[in-house]
Amino acid sequence: MSVSTGTVPVATITLSAIEQSKRLAAYTAVDKHILPEHKVIGIGSGSTVPYVVERIVAQGRELNKDRVFIPTGFQSKELIVMSSLNLGDVDQFPTIDVTIDGADEVDLDLNCIKGGGACHLREKVLAEAAKTFIVVADYRKNAEYLGTNFTPGVPVEVVPFAYAQVLRKLHSVLGSPNATLRMAKAKAGPVVTDNSNFVIDAPFPREMMMDPSTILAKIKMLTGVVEVGLFCNMAQAAYFGNEDGSVTVKRKVESKVVEESILPS
Ligand SMILES: O=C(CO)[C@H](O)[C@H](O)COP(=O)(O)O
């Protein structure tokens, strides 16, 4: 079975160190969290998630035939369908057993920046709907504070007619003078989300990023904002694949985050 990352099938290429790290994180998280009793599973977006699906498919048809998989957007819907898994939607299944998703960056408290792929509205709905929300990423995403390595800023999904007004407020009131409308790469004009909205990327100074819940609350209050790519106090665990073949696991234990290492076997 080979899962497509876009145009090149994963199984037929030699993986770079970063791709190997993504795969390691994804495989480890699936092995720990996607158990036979889990029947409704949320599938996130991004370049790490195909490895999640690959590992789930490897659990076999017998386990997967009674499961339903909920996508966070166009990409994961394609992935589910192409992998011959059962497709559902969150309006049919508002309670999800486990959602596994990627992240752009994760801090010491398991807060995440998400939305590098402009899917964070649906990703947040599926994270909230899940009894367990798990993040998978390569080592570059494991940071002390949000905004350390991921510098474009906090992704903010806005309804199109409100974007200029939201930008103005971000610049002049909320402390993000360099916030910009995200432009498309292979299309003239802005990125348009799966929900037909625009995305603003709003970088904040480090001292503000040390308190992501406060930024989240302030941006969310702006009229026209649909969702903010700050996922605060949502993830139960994050798995980071490392270059040396180990996996760093950060997980919540009685509201504290503990870190452990799974060494290569
Ligand atoms: O939030 C996301 C999309 O909106 C992705 O999960 C995030 O960008 C991580 O992607 P990748 O696995 O490619 O690093």
Image: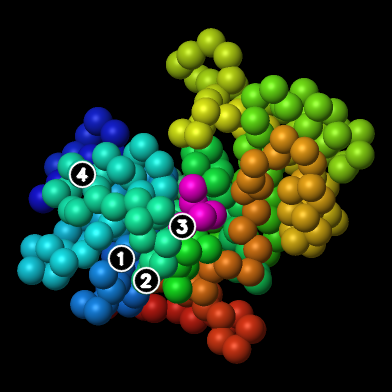
Q: Residue at x 41, y 48 (%)?
A: 72
For label 1, the residue is 40
Front residue of 136/194: it is 194
For label 3, the residue is 126
Q: Reply above or below: 221 against 239.
A: above
Q: Reply above or below: 61 against 35.
A: above
Q: Is residue 152 left or right of residue 262?
A: right
- Magenta part mainly helix, strand or loop? helix
- Disc number for residue 91: none
Q: Are marks 2 and 3 in contact (CB under 8 Å)?
A: no
Q: Which corner quadrant of the image does residue 145 belong to? A: bottom right
For label 2, the residue is 97
For label 4, the residue is 81
Badge 4 amino acid: Val
Badge 3 amino acid: Leu
Residue 85: x %, y % from top left: 18, 53
SS for tag 2? strand
Quadrant of the frame with the C terminus: bottom left
Q: Which corner quadrant of the image does residue 56 belong to? A: bottom left
Q: Does mark 1's beta carbon lie closer than 8 Å to ligand 1? A: no
Q: Residue at x 45, y 73 (%)?
A: 131
Say if residue 193 shows up in the picture: yes
Which segment did they paint magenta? 122-126
Residue 126: x %, y % from top left: 46, 57
Badge 2 amino acid: Asp
SS for tag 1? strand
SS for tag 3? helix
Q: Give the residue furthest to the bottom.
A: 254
Q: Give the residue furthest to the top.
A: 188
Dot 1: few (<14), some (14–19), or many (≥20) neighbours within 10 Å?
Answer: many
Q: Give the residue furthest to the left.
A: 62
